[in-house]
Amino acid sequence: MPIDIAIVGYAQSPSWERSELTEVQFLFPVIAEAIAMAGIDRRDIDFTCAGSCDYLSGQTFAFVSNLEAVGAWPPISESHVEMDGAWAMYEAWVALQHGDIDLALAFGSGKSSPGDPMQIYPLQMDPYTLTPLGADPTSLAALQARALLDSGRITEREMAEVAARNRRDAVANPYAQISGEEDVDALLASPYVTAPMRDHDLPPFSDGACAVILATADRARALSDNPVWIRGIDHRIEIHQPGMRDLRESPSTAAAGKGAGVADGPVDLAELSVAYTHQERILTDALGLGAGVKVNLSGGPLTANPMMATGLSRVAEAARAIQRGDGRRAVAHATSGQPLQQNLVCVLEGER
Amino acid sequence: MSEQPVVAASDSEQPVVMMDYFMHLEYREVVCPIVRRYADALMDGKILGQISPTSGLVYVPPRSYCPVSCEWLGEDHLVELEDHGVVTNFTIVTPVQYYGQEETEPFAKASVLLDGPGGMLGLQDILDLPVDELRVGMRVEAVWLPPEERTKDEIGNRSWGSVDGAIRGWRPTGEPDVPAEQFLDKVY
Amino acid sequence: MSQACAIVGIGQTKHKKRRDDVSLPGLVREAAQRALDDAELTWTDIDAVVLGKAPDPFEGVMMPELSMADALGAAGKPILRVHTAGSVGGSTAIVASNLVRTGQHRRVLTVAYEKQAEGNAQWGLAGGKSGGMGAGGIFAPWMRSFIARTGSPAHIGPMVAVKDRRNAVKNPYAHLQMPDLTIEEVMESPMLWDPIHWHESCPSSDGACAMVMTTEDLASASPRPPAWVLSTAMRSELGMFPGRDPVRPQAGVECAQAVFEAAGITDPLEQIDVSEIYVPFSWYEPMWLEGHDLVGHGEAWKLIESGDTDIGGRFPVNPSGGVLSSNPIGASGMLRFAEAALQVRGMAGEHQVDGATVAYGQAYGGAAQYFAMWVVGSTLDAVAAKG
């Protein structure tokens, strides 16, 4: 049986269209705030794991400077994944499973604004067959949306309704980049960007960061009267070649959800990495989330999408929602690869 | 990204095993506020650093934080540094050729510890000196470009101690060396 | 809770300047298939994959675990992608071992690679700008400081270069094969980054390394002797701040202390039979011997000069030929870890150190600021058995 681990601190930066600070500079206060929320000293942290991406910032070894935001002096026990911070949290969770340490920091950060994501993200695809075609995320998401529309599982109106609901919910989220009241008919009247995707179906690519502090059970209870427990965490990848997948389904999300124990109890709310409106349907179906589950109360990635921190932000937002009393049991989901190739699912539960 | 596949093997009898595929990605980054201050000061012939009140360490260029004490540094912590100092370490590089490399002859890169409040500039160019005469402990001074030739083009968030565009390099002052032993533990 | 982790399969590619006979997925599969064959397992036996490599821009493929998922048999499984600069191969192995030791998975495949010929690392390091100096330009001043601090004679670096190239001749996977290299030739070769000569620097290689790790109960069914993970440690420190000592980085000191203490090693020089240490430039052999407190200050050059770090010496270092003979960057750290494991399995072939039961693998990266280390043994009580 895994050791019980809880979230005792978390923090996010706002999602900016373009921050004038460097990645380290905007990460710095985020880590400090998560540490302050946990009520610990940074030197109490036994293990740190970071998630970031060299290609976003256009610099080899970009993650190295992020150590400065952690204050890696004296030396620390630390690791880095070239993945969303949610996977950094997984590695930190594994490190705590050894049972010989009790506090870990995980964070994710990214600065998308210097580059053009439509040019950069095709480099994630198979370098021999797909990158030369310029297989960009919008086009791949559009293929997926088209398949889903054609199967009758969603309509363009329902996609617009996801966008309108996310933007409305984001009004209350100080970290969101996009928010406001939208008229669904007006959204549907806008032109296609890449059919069947309209502007509202697509995410912003934000600058931003997120940090989470994990603690083992005794330490968590000593630090917080309201820790958020990680009841399960699992992640899976699936075949890369989009042509070999049924893009309407997300079997890797379903498998990770099963591994994390989503179905072991009622789910009150979910924070899902819905970067494209149609993906909400794919993900809720894969996770078996019914109509009663409140999805992306924060507004989700369609309103705040700090690449490399978007997935970890789902964990932080779900923890916040639980502590705020919006529900007791939540699902947080992170994704990587186009479209929805790799997925991580985490089940969170409040103390009361 | 521009796509320019080029068949590498010129001999058509040979099977093609490699194809060159050049990619071009452009990144445009806003220079952060503290580095803008630093760049403006360079244009005025001043080297700005930031000093941490807790650790006492001097950062040049300023970073807006001290990673050792983990405190945020602001305008109050700016300090004007001297434009002369001592070579504490160096290497002489025989340039490796790669796409975009313009250097062909061996060149020196030195660490310069500034006088006064301190501040260490790494990877500095040394001028007016045969590379084999460079030594640890040598006193050097900045060779500023004339004000009208100075440019901020080379200064960015990532330019690791750069004074490019304002200072051409550092030349020996001719003053006696500082004993090299003093700098054994000052590698940066 | 921590349980035992065994390495039951090890594979590596032939490391070469240019492996144009295989694609990127072909390269990693070559190593992974050999590791599976060694363990007599198949792709479907694997529960999870951990992939490591150095910066993505070196080959122009962003997050390659995504496009390689198919080739690595990872579809439907968890895959992690580690990146901790030059130490990444070591960190990747440690992350994989943690998945077994904490009971997350029963059989984990870990792979690390670099295909330098499909990109340009010098360009990548320079960010595409002129005046780039490569890693050697960063490290050279620190070697100069080490030499000055310790009074090491100038021929020590060249001696290490000759020793590692001689060892590489015994390793059929090694890239450089220079059986006749002499100290004089090293010292007469071009000075790339003073004090580093051409022959004192690592080559640029294409290559991959893979290991299969498993639990104690499954290891007992393995066809060949396992290597046991006795301890692991990772440490990182800030790369650049006034007063930092990059010649003897504190993270390296503390990482070594931690990994030896956890393995029950009190006298490394006596209790470790063989070491595989990340030495991309010859002077890093004495620098890490002292930087990890294997010997005292100013003692490393004497150990090397006396031939004690040769195969058959008192403290053999890099019998495989090391990074100086093969440098597929992302895989170089894992090769150190894997070669250490091969030694305690008694499967290192011609470069086997006789009777090795305890071995030390080390990798470092960044501005000498990331460290990954492990100690492996032929049995779980291999250190204690030495008395």
Image (cartoon, coloured by chain):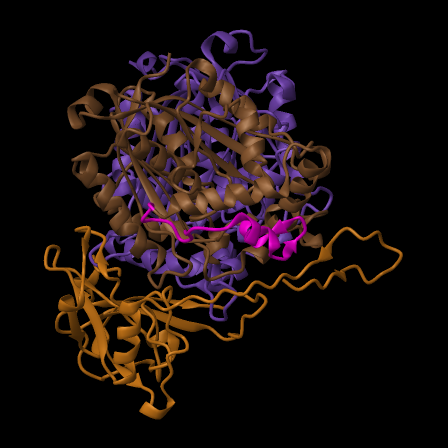
Q: Quadrant of residue C277?
A: top left
Residue A306 in sight from this viewpoint: yes
Vertical placement of residue A9 versus A194, above or below: above
Q: Is residue C175 visible?
A: no
x 55%, y 22%: residue: A255
Rendered residue at 64%/52% (across/down): C118
Query: Relative to A222, is B124 on the left or the right?
Result: right
Q: Which residue is located at x 28 percent, y 28 percent?
A: A325
Q: Quadrant of the N terminus of chain A?
A: top left
User: Which quarter of the figure has residue C147?
Assistant: bottom left
Colour in which chain B is drawn: orange
Q: Is residue A181 left or right of residue C261?
A: right
Whether residue A36 is situated above or below residue A120 in the rendered picture = above
Q: Is residue A131 magenta?
A: no
The stretch of residues the image draws in magenta is A172-200
Q: Position of residue C318 (x, y in %)?
A: 46, 36
Q: Is residue A187 above or below residue C216?
A: below
Instruction: Report which colour depicts chain A.
Output: brown
Q: Quadrant of residue A87?
A: top left
Q: Which chain is purple?
A: C
